[in-house]
Image: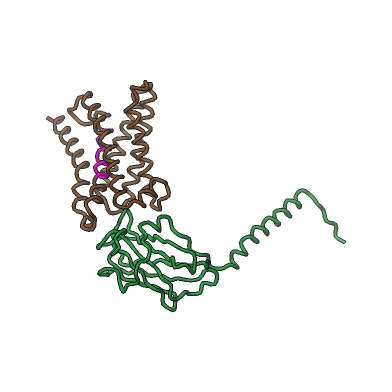
Amino acid sequence: MLIKTRARLIWLAFLIAMLAPMIAAAFSPLLAWRDSIYIIAGFAGIFAMALLLTQPLLIGGYLPSISQRKNRQFHKWFGALLVVMVLIHVVFLWFTSPPDVIDVLLFRSPTPFSLWGVIAMWALFLMGLMAAIRKKIRLPRYIWQRAHLGLAVITVIGSVGHAMLIEGTMETITKTVLCVFVIAATAKVISDRIKLKR
Amino acid sequence: MPKISLTRRSLLAASGAVAATSLSGLTVPARAAGLEPTKSMRGGANNYLSGAPIVERIGGGGFWMSGTVRRAGDGAPLAGQRIQIWAHTTEGYESDWESHGATLTDQNGVYRLEMPQIVPAFGQAHGHLAYDSGDFETVFLRPVMKSSKDTSLEANFVLKSV
């Protein structure tokens, strides 16, 4: 009974942390002055942040009553979805204001948060590329695991810095909670890995 | 006649003094040149459209963009200078023609233009300003608002003759 309650609470906390930012952002008064393309760009970014939370939780097996096989499967699918969301985020922002996005991609933007975002994006794309070709190029498992975790940490830190410094897309409290969860889940994966090695 | 003793210590002290003098010498001409010209800000020219008309106000107004325009060097106020302004506001995008307008500085080198409320865009509530009339070097500014609830924003120009 107690175990069931705990499992339910974990799922509840996970779903709230994931969905609350989107719901809160949907009530932003700023949406009135943005057109649909800009809004989609913003929400793709928020959804990507939420997906970022699922990744360490799945691979660490922290979500109750999902088998290890399913965890890995979902981790892969959500990883691919994360890449798609970031692509939508960037491309739709580009439709909204091409010069601003070009500045960001060329590392000459006046906004510091865009630098965090673009670093996180390249780390994510590199992870996606490695995941796609690692079997083909017969990447040794230990290299893959280390590279993937290293790039994942860069993606997490970059994305959290990116989101926290931005004004106008996410609601502050739900954003902060989601970011804390993402960092905590990632830290837990790392600490579990270290324990496993010992 | 006092004897000059050239020890290692005195040589070091002397060369140190010479270095200090030459370093301070570098700063003196800069001070003589006076007010430095304003440099264009990164991203300042984004979504710029040339030839924005001089207007009483942009759209419905409610927000004030203001500042001064002075000459580099002596800091003299520059009257009659055309400053162009655009931003993402409650009434439109930076790239919309209706979001753009221009105004002239008064005899004190002060400009002031009413425009719609600026709202955060691309992560920051910010405005864009341009001086590009040709008498002085072109300057593009991109000031950021301290709070997105502010109802005014200031940006000052120090222009250098071409």
- The quarter of the picture where residue B115 lies is bottom left
Q: Which colour scheme appears in the figure?
A: by chain
Q: Name the residue located 23 percent from the left edge and 24 percent from the top edge.
A: A68
Q: Which chain is brown?
A: A
User: Residue pushed farthest left?
Assistant: A1
Where's residue B94, x and y in %?
31, 59
User: Residue pushed farthest front?
Assistant: B51
Does the magenta run of residues contain A46? yes
Q: Depth check: B64 or A89 in front? A: A89
Question: Which quarter of the rendered picture does the N terminus of chain B lie within?
Answer: bottom right
Where's residue B52, x and y in %?
35, 66
Q: Name the residue located 39 percent from the left edge and 64 percent from the top edge.
A: B129
- The quarter of the picture where residue A9 lies is top left
Whether residue B145 is visible to the viewer of this picture, yes or no, is: no
Where's residue B121, x and y in %?
30, 55
Where's residue A155, x and y in %?
35, 38
Q: Which chain is green?
A: B
The answer to whether residue A53 is left or right of residue B144 is left
Q: Depth check: A187 or B28 in front? A: B28
Whether residue A39 is visible to the viewer of this picture, yes or no, is: yes
Q: Name the residue located 82 percent from the left edge and 53 percent from the top edge.
A: B5
User: Residue pushed farthest bottom?
Assistant: B107
The answer to whether residue B26 is left or right of residue A107 is right
Q: Name the residue located 27 percent from the left edge and 66 percent from the top edge.
A: B116
The answer to whether residue A127 is left or right of residue B27 is left
The answer to whether residue B76 is left or right of residue B17 is left
**Which residues make up the magenta segment?**
A44-56
Does the magenta run of residues contain A90? no
